[in-house]
């Protein structure tokens, strides 16, 4: 018993948390490895950045000022 | 002219309004395009933050640091049926679940999952409430900025947190499922292994106090301060190989394991029984007969002979309780000193539990149920003798000297003073016991009866028994003699009642070899075998004894 609760409960709860951490760290490692490989990460971020800017620019130019039409 | 001027003015004003509106709309769209960029960045960054914030939530909940009240199951929840549905099965079902901690998977795991989801709700709800309050209770301009700037990044955070919590739930579900499958396989294996092994050894608990029979004994917790009684130690929702009592003490699961270490209790009267009761074959041997028929003497002589028979063959006989030890000592003393047998008190008998172990270490618990003859006087007095219902074989001790013809010969031979003869109607004793069992619907045709003619030492001196004395003294010749000497009605009744009736002639006063046809040991051997004892015995058929020209030596009745 630990703090009035069976030790098995603590072991299982720790197991869930460790598995959760492992899953997220694995996800992070996978993302980092993928990013590092052949500059994919940099390309993804720049593409994502460009896409964000492109969306922004598209909307920005959606309605020109009146004098721009002249 | 005035109207024309007014029209021009209106047109100019409209053009100005349209141009100003256009410019304002274009400015708004440009501002919105910047906001879109901010939202995309904000959503993405907060999503990543939410993903890792979700890591903290389960940890906070499971260490009781969360805001959400995690439901911790306790032994009280088990007892009140709140921990899980379903009721226990088997003989102990009427007691409900034992006061012990439930297994973590799946019962507490389910509550933990609910706790984590609840904590995520509370956590995100609090942040959302802070945003709403920030918008509501700040100056209009700041509120408007917050209203535009915060919600979208918050939704990114929200999505990140829930994705993380989803991963936690997935991990729990996957690992929990594997654990649950393993537990189910283990549970069924352990449970059935325990049941089958006990069934194979024909093990059951027979209480020598209240006569109750059970295949699921109760056990008291190992902790001397704890008074909790565990009614069903089979693997189940409270544990596989071990369970945790509400007091925190770890107890072994399975009845075989529990019997090795825990104090055993009768599930009916809650009295403590001998260790390992319930996991060995137990024979309750009921002896029927009227007052003075020779029941107690027969049992004492038989048990002393059994002891010597077992010890000669590397076996042993041990008293289970102090009272049984006293009985064993008294039996040795009475038999070896040929002393008069003390009258059995007219009270509800406690069984005398003895552990018999043969050379092959096969064990049988023999409980001698020696009720006073008064107990068989009427149907009412036999009503309390519930052990009669459970036994497979009975011994009916019959005093042949009480029969009128033999009583007459006893007087004529001057032997009337040497022996106590029962003064009661022995048929009534038999009838009272049988009526009690019939009333309880005991299938007597599947039961066996050993009819024991006692006091052979005196009987064989009488003229009417001369033919018997010269016979082989086996069951057949005893039956034949009884039929020829007015026992025919009784024999017919007994043989109609029981599936098997075996006849013995016993001399409990003198020492005989165990293979002697008058040996009391043969009755015990037959009863043990008839009750399915796995002890190794010699041939149960009494060897054809030498045709005895003379009666056995005169007993030294003190």
Image (cartoon, helix red, strand yellow):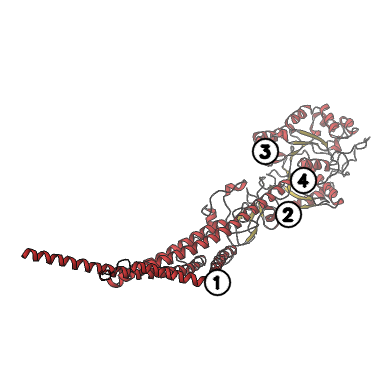
Q: Quadrant of residue B543?
A: top right
* Chain letter of the residue carrying label 4: B
Q: What SS does tag 1 mark?
A: helix
Q: Which residue is mark 4?
A: B342
Mark 1, other Cα within 10 Å: few <14 / some 14–19 / many ≥20: few
Q: Is residue B448 left or right of residue B10?
A: right
| Badges 2 and 4, same chain | yes
Q: What SS does tag 3 mark?
A: helix
Q: Position of residue B345 (x, y in %)?
A: 71, 45
First in sequence, mark 3 or 4: give its number: 4
| Badges 4 and 1, same chain | no
* Chain letter of the residue carrying label 2: B
- The residue nearer to you, when weighing B473 against B73, is B73
Q: Nearer the viewer, mark 1 or mark 2?
A: 1
Mark 4, other Cα within 10 Å: few <14 / some 14–19 / many ≥20: few
- Asked if the residues shown at circle 2 and circle 4 are in contact, with their CB atoms under 8 angstroms apart, the answer is no
Q: Which residue is mark 3?
A: B382
Mark 2, other Cα within 10 Å: few <14 / some 14–19 / many ≥20: few
Mark 3, other Cα within 10 Å: few <14 / some 14–19 / many ≥20: many
Q: Which residue is mark 2?
A: B322
Q: Residue at x 12, y 66 (%)?
A: B8
Q: Which residue is mark 1?
A: A38
* Chain letter of the residue carrying label 1: A
Q: Position of residue B14 (x, y in %)?
A: 17, 65
First in sequence, mark 3 or 2: give its number: 2
């Amino acid at each position: 018993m630990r703090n009035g609760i069976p030790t098995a409960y603590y072991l299982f709860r720790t197991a869930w948390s460790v598995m959760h951490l492992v899953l997220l760290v694995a996800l992070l490692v996978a993302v980092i490895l993928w990013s590092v490989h052949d500059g994919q990460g940099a390309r993804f971020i720049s593409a994502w950045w460009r896409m964000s800017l492109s969306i922004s620019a598209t909307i920005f130019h959606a309605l020109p000022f009146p004098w721009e039409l002249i | 002219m005035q109207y024309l001027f007014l029209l021009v003015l209106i047109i100019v004003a409209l053009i100005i309004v349209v141009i100003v509106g256009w410019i304002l709309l274009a400015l708004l769209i440009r501002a919105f395009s910047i906001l879109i960029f901010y939202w995309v960045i904000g959503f993405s960054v907060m999503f990543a933050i939410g993903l890792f914030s979700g890591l903290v939530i389960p940890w906070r909940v499971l260490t009781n640091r969360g805001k959400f009240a995690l439901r911790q199951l306790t032994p009280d929840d088990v007892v009140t049926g709140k921990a899980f549905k379903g009721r226990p099965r088997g003989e102990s079902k009427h007691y409900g679940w034992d006061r012990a901690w439930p297994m973590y998977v799946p019962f507490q795991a389910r509550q933990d999952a609910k706790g984590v989801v609840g904590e995520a709700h509370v956590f995100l709800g609090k942040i959302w409430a802070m945003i709403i309050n920030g918008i509501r209770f700040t100056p209009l301009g700041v509120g408007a900025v917050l209203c535009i700037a915060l919600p979208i990044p918050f939704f990114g955070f929200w999505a990140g947190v829930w994705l993380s919590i989803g991963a936690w739930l997935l991990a729990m579900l996957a690992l929990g499922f594997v654990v649950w499958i393993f537990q189910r396989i283990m549970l069924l294996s352990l449970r059935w292994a325990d049941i089958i092994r006990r069934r194979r050894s024909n093990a059951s608990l027979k209480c020598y106090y209240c006569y109750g029979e059970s295949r699921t004994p109760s056990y008291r917790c190992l902790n001397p301060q704890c008074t909790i009684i565990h009614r069903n130690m089979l693997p189940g929702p409270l544990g596989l190989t071990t369970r945790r009592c509400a007091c925190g003490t770890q107890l072994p699961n399975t009845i075989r394991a529990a019997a090795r270490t825990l104090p055993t209790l009768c599930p009916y009267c809650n009295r403590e029984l001998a260790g390992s009761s319930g996991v060995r074959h137990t024979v309750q041997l009921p002896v029927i007969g009227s007052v003075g028929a020779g029941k107690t003497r027969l049992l004492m002589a038989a048990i002393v002979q059994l002891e010597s028979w077992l010890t000669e063959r590397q076996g042993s006989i041990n008293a289970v309780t102090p009272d049984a030890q006293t009985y064993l000592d008294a039996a040795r003393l009475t038999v070896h000193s040929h002393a008069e047998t003390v009258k059995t008190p007219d009270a509800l008998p406690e069984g005398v539990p003895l552990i018999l172990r043969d050379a092959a270490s096969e064990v049988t618990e023999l409980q001698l149920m020696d009720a006073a003859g008064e107990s068989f006087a009427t149907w009412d007095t036999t009503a309390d003798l519930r052990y009669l219902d459970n036994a497979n074989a009975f011994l009916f001790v019959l005093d042949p000297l009480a029969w009128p013809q033999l009583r007459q010969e006893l007087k004529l031979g001057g032997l009337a003073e040497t022996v106590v003869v029962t003064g009661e109607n022995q048929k009534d004793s038999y009838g009272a016991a049988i009526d009690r069992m019939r009333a309880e619907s005991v299938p007597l045709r599947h039961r066996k009866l050993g009819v024991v003619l006692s006091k052979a030492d005196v009987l064989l001196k009488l003229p009417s028994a001369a033919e018997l004395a010269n016979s082989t003294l086996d069951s057949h010749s005893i039956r034949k003699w009884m039929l020829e000497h007015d026992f025919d009605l009784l024999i017919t009744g007994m043989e109609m009642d029981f599936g098997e009736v075996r006849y013995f002639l016993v001399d409990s006063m003198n020492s005989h070899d165990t293979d002697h046809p008058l040996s009391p040991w043969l009755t015990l051997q037959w009863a043990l075998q008839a009750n399915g004892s796995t002890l190794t015995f010699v041939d149960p058929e009494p060897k054809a004894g030498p045709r005895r020209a003379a009666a056995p030596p005169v007993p030294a009745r003190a």
